[in-house]
Image (cartoon, helix red, strand yellow):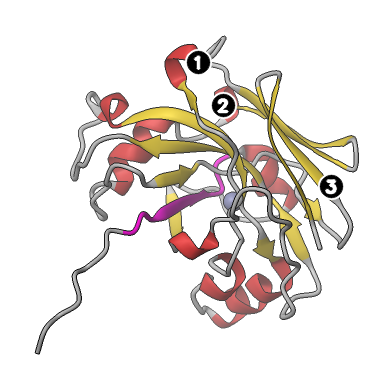
Amino acid sequence: MVKQPISDPMKIICIGRNYLAHIAELDRDLPTEPLFFMKPDTALLPDGRAFPYPVFSEKVHYETELVLRICKRGSSISLDSAHEYYDAVTVGIDFTARDVQQRCIEKGHPWEKAKAFDYSAPVGEFKKISDLKNAQKISFGMKRNDQWAQQGNSADMIFGFDTIVSYVSRFVTLKEGDYIFTGTPQGVGEVHQGDLLELYLEDEKILKFEVK
Ligand code: ZN
Protein backbone atom coordinates (compact mmCIF):
# COMPACT_ATOMS: atom_id res chain seq x y z
CA MET A 1 0.00 0.00 0.00
CA VAL A 2 1.36 3.39 -0.98
CA LYS A 3 1.01 5.97 1.73
CA GLN A 4 0.16 9.53 0.87
CA PRO A 5 3.01 11.89 1.69
CA ILE A 6 2.27 13.55 4.99
CA SER A 7 1.73 17.25 4.52
CA ASP A 8 3.10 19.56 7.16
CA PRO A 9 0.20 21.56 8.53
CA MET A 10 0.74 24.28 11.06
CA LYS A 11 -1.08 24.24 14.39
CA ILE A 12 -2.60 26.91 16.56
CA ILE A 13 -2.09 26.81 20.30
CA CYS A 14 -4.25 29.02 22.50
CA ILE A 15 -3.59 30.09 26.06
CA GLY A 16 -6.60 30.51 28.34
CA ARG A 17 -7.01 32.65 31.47
CA ASN A 18 -3.94 34.85 31.03
CA TYR A 19 -5.31 38.24 32.20
CA LEU A 20 -6.67 38.77 35.72
CA ALA A 21 -9.59 40.99 34.76
CA HIS A 22 -10.82 38.47 32.15
CA ILE A 23 -10.68 35.59 34.66
CA ALA A 24 -12.84 37.70 36.97
CA GLU A 25 -15.41 38.58 34.29
CA LEU A 26 -16.00 34.88 33.49
CA ASP A 27 -15.70 33.85 37.16
CA ARG A 28 -12.98 31.27 36.44
CA ASP A 29 -10.24 30.01 38.78
CA LEU A 30 -6.79 31.62 38.70
CA PRO A 31 -4.33 29.28 36.95
CA THR A 32 -1.09 28.24 38.65
CA GLU A 33 0.45 27.27 35.30
CA PRO A 34 -0.53 28.14 31.71
CA LEU A 35 -3.71 26.49 30.42
CA PHE A 36 -3.72 25.69 26.73
CA PHE A 37 -5.84 24.12 24.02
CA MET A 38 -5.45 23.84 20.25
CA LYS A 39 -7.17 24.74 17.01
CA PRO A 40 -6.44 23.07 13.64
CA ASP A 41 -5.16 24.98 10.61
CA THR A 42 -8.72 24.90 9.22
CA ALA A 43 -9.62 27.46 11.93
CA LEU A 44 -7.78 30.17 9.98
CA LEU A 45 -9.96 32.67 8.12
CA PRO A 46 -8.72 33.23 4.55
CA ASP A 47 -7.77 36.84 3.77
CA GLY A 48 -10.66 38.96 2.61
CA ARG A 49 -13.36 36.53 3.74
CA ALA A 50 -16.17 37.25 6.19
CA PHE A 51 -16.43 35.18 9.37
CA PRO A 52 -19.43 32.85 8.93
CA TYR A 53 -21.47 32.79 12.14
CA PRO A 54 -21.61 29.08 13.10
CA VAL A 55 -25.03 27.43 12.92
CA PHE A 56 -24.52 25.41 16.13
CA SER A 57 -24.23 28.38 18.49
CA GLU A 58 -26.40 31.26 19.61
CA LYS A 59 -23.70 32.99 21.65
CA VAL A 60 -20.40 33.46 19.85
CA HIS A 61 -17.91 35.63 21.74
CA TYR A 62 -14.87 37.48 20.39
CA GLU A 63 -11.60 37.21 22.32
CA THR A 64 -9.00 39.66 20.99
CA GLU A 65 -5.48 38.33 21.53
CA LEU A 66 -1.83 38.87 20.66
CA VAL A 67 -0.64 35.99 18.46
CA LEU A 68 2.99 34.83 18.28
CA ARG A 69 4.55 33.18 15.24
CA ILE A 70 7.02 30.39 15.93
CA CYS A 71 10.21 30.68 13.81
CA LYS A 72 12.20 27.62 14.88
CA ARG A 73 11.42 24.02 15.73
CA GLY A 74 11.86 23.13 19.39
CA SER A 75 10.76 21.00 22.29
CA SER A 76 11.52 21.34 26.01
CA ILE A 77 12.69 24.89 25.31
CA SER A 78 14.35 26.58 28.27
CA LEU A 79 12.95 29.83 29.60
CA ASP A 80 16.27 31.55 28.79
CA SER A 81 16.24 30.58 25.12
CA ALA A 82 12.47 30.85 24.53
CA HIS A 83 12.81 34.28 22.86
CA GLU A 84 14.77 32.68 19.98
CA TYR A 85 11.73 30.61 18.98
CA TYR A 86 9.33 33.41 18.00
CA ASP A 87 10.01 36.43 15.87
CA ALA A 88 6.72 38.05 14.98
CA VAL A 89 3.42 39.05 16.53
CA THR A 90 -0.02 40.07 15.36
CA VAL A 91 -3.56 40.30 16.71
CA GLY A 92 -6.19 37.65 16.19
CA ILE A 93 -9.64 36.67 17.37
CA ASP A 94 -10.17 33.45 19.31
CA PHE A 95 -13.85 33.03 18.43
CA THR A 96 -15.60 30.99 21.11
CA ALA A 97 -19.06 29.44 21.05
CA ARG A 98 -19.66 30.42 24.68
CA ASP A 99 -22.94 28.51 25.04
CA VAL A 100 -21.33 25.33 23.70
CA GLN A 101 -18.25 25.87 25.89
CA GLN A 102 -20.40 26.29 28.99
CA ARG A 103 -22.11 22.95 28.32
CA CYS A 104 -18.71 21.29 27.77
CA ILE A 105 -17.42 22.69 31.07
CA GLU A 106 -20.51 21.52 32.96
CA LYS A 107 -20.11 17.99 31.60
CA GLY A 108 -16.32 17.95 31.98
CA HIS A 109 -15.96 17.49 28.21
CA PRO A 110 -13.17 18.87 25.98
CA TRP A 111 -13.67 22.36 24.53
CA GLU A 112 -12.93 21.61 20.87
CA LYS A 113 -16.51 22.03 19.63
CA ALA A 114 -16.60 25.49 21.19
CA LYS A 115 -13.12 26.63 20.17
CA ALA A 116 -11.67 24.72 17.21
CA PHE A 117 -14.44 25.13 14.65
CA ASP A 118 -13.86 26.34 11.07
CA TYR A 119 -12.77 29.98 10.72
CA SER A 120 -12.61 30.48 14.51
CA ALA A 121 -9.09 31.98 14.35
CA PRO A 122 -8.78 35.05 12.09
CA VAL A 123 -5.29 36.57 12.38
CA GLY A 124 -3.87 39.83 11.09
CA GLU A 125 -0.64 40.55 9.28
CA PHE A 126 2.41 39.65 11.37
CA LYS A 127 4.94 42.28 12.42
CA LYS A 128 8.54 41.61 13.39
CA ILE A 129 8.82 42.02 17.15
CA SER A 130 12.04 43.99 16.61
CA ASP A 131 10.05 46.56 14.58
CA LEU A 132 7.53 47.30 17.35
CA LYS A 133 7.60 50.60 19.22
CA ASN A 134 7.64 48.89 22.60
CA ALA A 135 8.15 45.11 22.59
CA GLN A 136 7.84 44.99 26.39
CA LYS A 137 4.43 46.68 26.44
CA ILE A 138 2.60 45.77 23.26
CA SER A 139 -0.75 47.51 23.04
CA PHE A 140 -3.54 45.99 20.97
CA GLY A 141 -7.27 46.16 20.55
CA MET A 142 -10.37 45.58 18.50
CA LYS A 143 -13.09 47.93 17.31
CA ARG A 144 -16.55 46.49 16.73
CA ASN A 145 -18.68 48.67 14.49
CA ASP A 146 -16.26 51.58 15.02
CA GLN A 147 -16.35 51.42 18.86
CA TRP A 148 -13.53 50.03 20.99
CA ALA A 149 -14.67 46.60 22.17
CA GLN A 150 -11.40 45.43 23.74
CA GLN A 151 -8.03 46.98 24.48
CA GLY A 152 -5.12 45.19 26.09
CA ASN A 153 -1.41 45.32 26.76
CA SER A 154 1.09 42.47 26.89
CA ALA A 155 2.44 43.91 30.16
CA ASP A 156 -0.78 42.70 31.88
CA MET A 157 -0.35 39.04 30.97
CA ILE A 158 -0.01 36.59 33.88
CA PHE A 159 2.30 34.35 31.84
CA GLY A 160 4.60 36.19 29.40
CA PHE A 161 5.65 35.06 25.91
CA ASP A 162 8.80 33.25 27.08
CA THR A 163 6.98 31.35 29.82
CA ILE A 164 4.23 30.31 27.39
CA VAL A 165 6.66 29.08 24.71
CA SER A 166 8.80 27.20 27.22
CA TYR A 167 5.82 25.64 28.99
CA VAL A 168 3.89 24.50 25.90
CA SER A 169 7.05 23.01 24.35
CA ARG A 170 7.37 20.60 27.29
CA PHE A 171 4.26 18.83 25.96
CA VAL A 172 4.03 19.67 22.26
CA THR A 173 6.89 20.25 19.79
CA LEU A 174 6.65 23.74 18.33
CA LYS A 175 7.43 24.10 14.64
CA GLU A 176 8.23 27.02 12.38
CA GLY A 177 4.92 28.51 11.24
CA ASP A 178 2.88 27.51 14.30
CA TYR A 179 0.85 30.26 15.99
CA ILE A 180 0.25 30.83 19.68
CA PHE A 181 -2.75 32.90 20.82
CA THR A 182 -1.68 34.36 24.16
CA GLY A 183 -5.00 34.96 25.92
CA THR A 184 -7.67 37.63 25.99
CA PRO A 185 -7.88 40.70 28.19
CA GLN A 186 -11.20 41.72 29.71
CA GLY A 187 -14.14 42.87 27.65
CA VAL A 188 -15.11 39.73 25.75
CA GLY A 189 -18.57 39.96 24.26
CA GLU A 190 -20.96 38.71 21.63
CA VAL A 191 -20.65 39.23 17.91
CA HIS A 192 -23.64 39.37 15.61
CA GLN A 193 -24.19 38.93 11.91
CA GLY A 194 -23.44 42.20 10.14
CA ASP A 195 -20.74 43.31 12.62
CA LEU A 196 -17.53 44.83 11.29
CA LEU A 197 -14.41 43.97 13.35
CA GLU A 198 -11.13 45.91 13.05
CA LEU A 199 -7.99 44.71 14.82
CA TYR A 200 -5.15 46.97 15.92
CA LEU A 201 -1.52 46.26 16.85
CA GLU A 202 -0.01 49.32 18.50
CA ASP A 203 -1.49 52.12 16.33
CA GLU A 204 -1.81 50.11 13.16
CA LYS A 205 -4.94 48.47 11.80
CA ILE A 206 -3.82 44.98 10.81
CA LEU A 207 -7.07 43.17 9.99
CA LYS A 208 -10.65 44.02 9.12
CA PHE A 209 -13.48 41.60 8.40
CA GLU A 210 -17.24 41.22 8.62
CA VAL A 211 -19.42 38.69 10.41
CA LYS A 212 -21.95 37.15 8.04
ZN1 ZN B 1 -8.85 32.96 24.04
Tell me if the residue at label 2 has its CB under 8 Å from ligand 1.
no
Identify the mark nearer the N-term, 3 or 2.
2
On the rendered structure, is 35 left or right of 61?
left
Horizontal and vertical percent position of residue 46: 59, 54
Residue for point 43% across, 28% down: 88
Residue for point 35% across, 44% down: 177
Q: Nearer the viewer, residue 150 or 29?
A: 150
164 to 17, vertically: above or below: above
| Amino acid identity at mark 1 | Gln
Would you name the residue on which mark 2 appears? 154
Q: Nearer the viewer, mark 3 or mark 2?
A: 3
Structural crowding at the residue carrying mark 1, measured as other residues with C-alpha within 10 Å and reported as few (<14), some (14–19) or many (≥20): few
Horizontal and vertical percent position of residue 66: 56, 36
Total number of numbered labels?
Answer: 3
Would you name the residue on which mark 3 appears? 196
Question: CB of mark 3 within 8 Å of CB of mark 1?
Answer: no
173 to 90, vertically: above or below: below
Q: CA distance from mark 3 to mark 1?
A: 30 Å
152 to 193, vertically: above or below: above
Structural crowding at the residue carrying mark 3, measured as other residues with C-alpha within 10 Å and reported as few (<14), some (14–19) or many (≥20): some
| Amino acid identity at mark 3 | Leu
Q: Secondary structure at mark 3?
A: strand
Read off the magenta span: 9-18
Q: Nearer the viewer, residue 55 or 115?
A: 55
On the rendered structure, is 96 left or right of 74?
right
**Is residue 12 within the magenta segment?**
yes
| Amino acid identity at mark 2 | Ser
